[in-house]
Image (cartoon, rainbow, N blue to C red):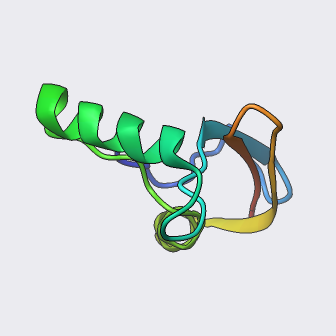
Amino acid sequence: MTFARRSAASRSGGALVIVEWDLGPRNAAPDGKFSDLEMLVGTGGRVRSTDQHAALLARSGFHLERSARTPLGYGVLEALAV
């Protein structure tokens, strides 16, 4: 997934929420890693880490405000338009 530049529809302070597998630390939380492997084999895509999302968001005019991991292993990231 490629983030487009922030448009007029997301004014400064507008929120963007991303829900995706949380890869977690090395040698832990295998579900996200299996999903990453499936995406790589099936589509050539990949699951990104929180740091990788933060870098993409910054290049797209957003700031990663906070992130949380759900009990099911998903990561929820909240980004604000700057």
Q: Is residue 35 above or below residue 75?
A: above
As drawn, is 66 to the left or to the right of 33? right
Q: Which residue is outermost to the top? A: 42
Q: Is residue 43 visible?
A: yes
Q: Is residue 52 above or below residue 11?
A: below
Q: Kindly tell me whether residue 82 is visible in this rendering.
A: no
Question: What quarter of the picture does the N terminus occupy?
Answer: top left
Q: Position of residue 52 (x, y in %)?
A: 47, 68
Percent of width and height locating residue 5: 47, 55
Q: Nearer the viewer, residue 55 or 46?
A: 46
Measured as percent of width and height from the top left, residue 66 is found at 83, 63
Quadrant assignment, res 43: top left
Q: Residue drawn 26% across and 31% down? A: 38
Check the image and report above or below for 50 versus 17. Answer: below
Q: Residue at x 51, y 62 (%)?
A: 49
Figure disc tally: 0
Q: Residue furthest front?
A: 27
Residue at x 80%, y 59% (from the top left corner): 12
Q: Residue at x 27, y 33 (%)?
A: 39
The x and y percentages for residue 21 are 56, 40
Q: Quadrant of the C terminus?
A: bottom right
